[in-house]
Amino acid sequence: MVGKITDNKDLSGSLIVALMGHSQFTSPNTLLTNILGARGVAPFFFQEVEQNEAMLMGDLVEPLIVKRTADILGIDKVTDKVRVPYHYHHDGKKLFSVSLDGILHVETKKTITIDDRSTFAPQGLNLDFVIEGDGNLEVKNTRTYFRDVPLPHLGVWQLQAGLMATKRKWGV
């Protein structure tokens, strides 16, 4: 974990859940007023979120989860400290930014199987897919119980935003 690297003035991949109205912590309206406040638009103000114990623990175990996921998938080369944000543009305008938890590097085509309950893919469980090149890794350490197909707000939208911003074809 390298800390927050996306600008508060922009929508970030981790906040897309709030934009879609599925966050238990903030509403779409609060999200948008926070962004306006960070941009200095009166009368709005930016409300900093203080890191709590659960957030700190997630930051501390994230590199271990990145390494373990790479091991489970049989991928030897991994970047676990991504220090630059990626941006998604449409019609020349930046729509959002993302920071990645990790990048998995696969030099030659390989088939991986998602068949256990430790690794999610947005498509669900019990599937094989061919990977090659770099793939995004979105880490979630949660007390939420396992589902065969993860709910979109449990990392799926964030992973998809990361794939859009990096123009990569795969991620877990």
Image (tube, rainbow, N blue to C red):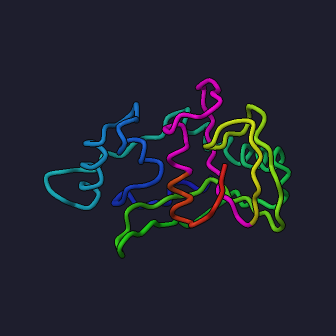
| Residue at figure coordinates x 45%, y 66% from the top left | 88
Q: Residue furthest top?
A: 145
- 25 lies left or right of 142: left
Q: How many marks?
A: 0
Q: Give x and y (percent) for residue 156.
A: 55, 44
Q: Quadrant of residue 84?
A: bottom right
For residue 56, above or below residue 8: above
Specify the farthest residue to the bottom. 92
Residue 105: quarter of image: bottom right
Point 41% across, 69% down: residue: 89
Which is more toward the observer, 159 or 34? 159
Query: Is residue 35 located in the magenta-colored stretch of the structure?
Result: no
- Residue 50 screen position, x and y as percent: 42, 41
Could you tell me which residue is drawn at 67 percent across and 39 percent down?
A: 120
Which one is in front, 154 or 139? 154
Q: Is residue 144 magenta?
A: yes
What is the x, y in percent for residue 87?
A: 47, 67
Residue 93, horizontal then vertical, whole percent:
34, 71
Which span is picked out in magenta? 133-159
| Residue at 41% across, 60% down | 96
In the image, residue 99 above or below residue 146:
below
Give left or right: position of 4 versus 75: left
Near-viewer residue (139 or 62): 139
